[in-house]
Amino acid sequence: MDFITFTREMKTFPAFSLKETGKLSGKVYYHRIIEWQKKGYIKRIANSIYMFADEDLDEMYLYYIANRLYEPSYISLESAFAFHSFIPDAVYGITSVTSKKTATFRNDNLVFSFRTLHRKYNFAYSLINWRNVTVKMAEPEKAVIDYFYLNPHLNSIEQIEGMRFNALQMKEKLDWDKISGYLTIYENKTLCKRIALLKEMVDNA
């Protein structure tokens, strides 16, 4: 298969794997992938995931790539906070949670970080439709729980205030009843106390 035909059949996909190229109308040999990569037509990201080199990497594109790099996973923690406008600054790298072991992937200036959560805690993410695919993004309530679960050092109002959370956005978007329901799954008293401190800060904003 030549590159023009390959582009026509694959361009609708933001990223693709070698396995997916096997579903095309013609055979794509691995040496062709290497040749196109050397010519700058496509770029290897990591884990045998590729993208077309002329694509613009906006945030949704990076979120989708993160979902594909390390499955199962979903966007959470700082990246989800930025998506839901809970923190004021741009986030360095893309952060996700996964039921697999903790891992980090680097490509050029891109960093994709994955933190481990037990598979029973991998829930409460939304499927955002984007370019014929879906992106897994933590609900705002689950992003909060994920973050405080994985950062147990945030155990005082002062430390939580140091995170520079946008308390007004949190007050508007967070469903505290939903958070309480999710917390029953964790059965973690210290986590509940840390979340209560966050709620106190938000309520007083």
Image: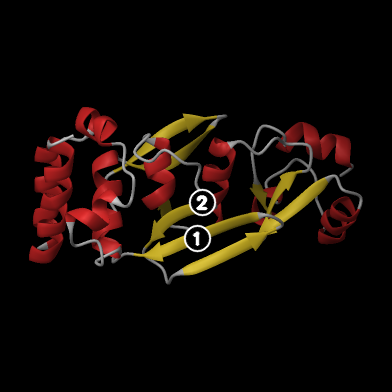
Q: Identify whether 33 is placed above or below 15.
A: below
Residue 30 visible in the displayed image: yes
Give the residue type that dot 1 points to: Ser
Give the image location of residue 188, x and y in percent: 11, 65
Rendered residue at 50%/50% (across/down): 67
Q: Nearer the viewer, residue 140 or 200?
A: 200
Q: Is residue 165 left or right of residue 174?
A: right
Q: Position of residue 177 (x, y in %)?
A: 9, 39
Which label sits on residue 94?
2
Q: Secondary structure at mark 2?
A: strand
Q: Residue at x 87, y 48 (%)?
A: 40
Q: Hey, which quadrant is residue 174 in on the image?
A: top left
Position of residue 146 in the picture relative to residue 81 (left or right): left
Q: Which residue is mark 1?
A: 113
Q: At 72% across and 36% down in the image, what residue appears?
A: 55
Labels 2 & 1 near each other (Cβ < 8 A): yes
159 or 198, nearer to the observer: 159
Placement of 14 over or under 157, stated as above or below: above
In this rendering, the answer to whether 19 lies above or below 9 is below
Gap between marks 2 and 1, in whole Å? 6 Å
Residue 75 appears in the figure: no
Q: Nearer the viewer, residue 28 or 117?
A: 117
Residue 104 horizontal side relative to residue 42, left or right? left
Q: Earlier in the sequence, mark 2 or mark 1?
A: 2
Residue 6 falls in which quadrant of the image?
A: top right
* Amino acid residing under circle 2: Ile
Q: Position of residue 105 (x, y in %)?
A: 59, 63
Residue at 46%, 41% in the rendered image: 89
Mark identifier at residue 80: none
Q: Quadrant of the C terminus?
A: top left
